[in-house]
Image: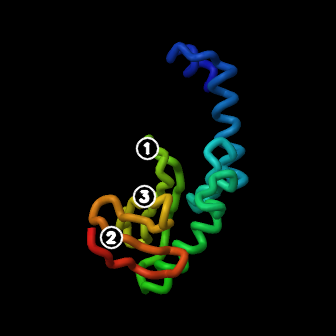
Amino acid sequence: TIEDLACALGIEPSALKGTLDKYNAACASGVDEAYALDGDGYVYEEWLTFRDVTASEWENLIRKYYTDQENAGIAYISFYYDEDDLFCADITLEDETDLAFAFDDETGYAREKNVGTIIDFENEAEVNREE
């Protein structure tokens, strides 16, 4: 039983059962309230904003950019503020390409962390500028 497993692991049985009950309810509903994920892996972080634009609005801009660029589309996207307080987006495309962007506070442009590509998602354009 779950209770026997909890005892064998040194975990409070009611705590493990409660965690499993929440997990099973999230699986059944398709929404994980604890991690704000829906069944497709998208992150709902409405409270998270950058330049007065919500995370879901940024998601729509980024999805439109990648659709217009004839890429594979987005399988997963997450937004967060990093240790330097930069607004960031981690994106996995449907072709399993992983991208990580940090947004510039002044311009709103997003710099791809690994290759340095700069994208203006608001205007659906790659930005070419001298560094």
Q: Residue at x 69, y 29 (%)?
A: 18
Tell me residue 26's x, y (percent): 68, 47
Label number found at residue 102:
3
Left/right placement of residue 126 relative to residue 57 reads: left
Count residues near mark 1 (Cα–Cα under 10 Å), then give few for <14, some for 14-19, many for 20+.
few
Q: Residue at x 60, y 72 (%)?
A: 60
Q: Which residue is mark 2?
A: 117
Q: How many marks?
A: 3
Tell me residue 27's x, y (percent): 65, 50
Which residue is at the front of the view, 107 or 9?
A: 107
Label number found at residue 84:
1
Q: Quadrant of the N terminus?
A: top right
Which amino acid type is marked by label 3?
Answer: Ala
Q: Secondary structure at mark 2?
A: loop
Which residue is at the front of the view, 109 or 14?
A: 109
Q: Residue at x 53, y 13 (%)?
A: 10
Mark 2 or 1, nearer chain start: 1
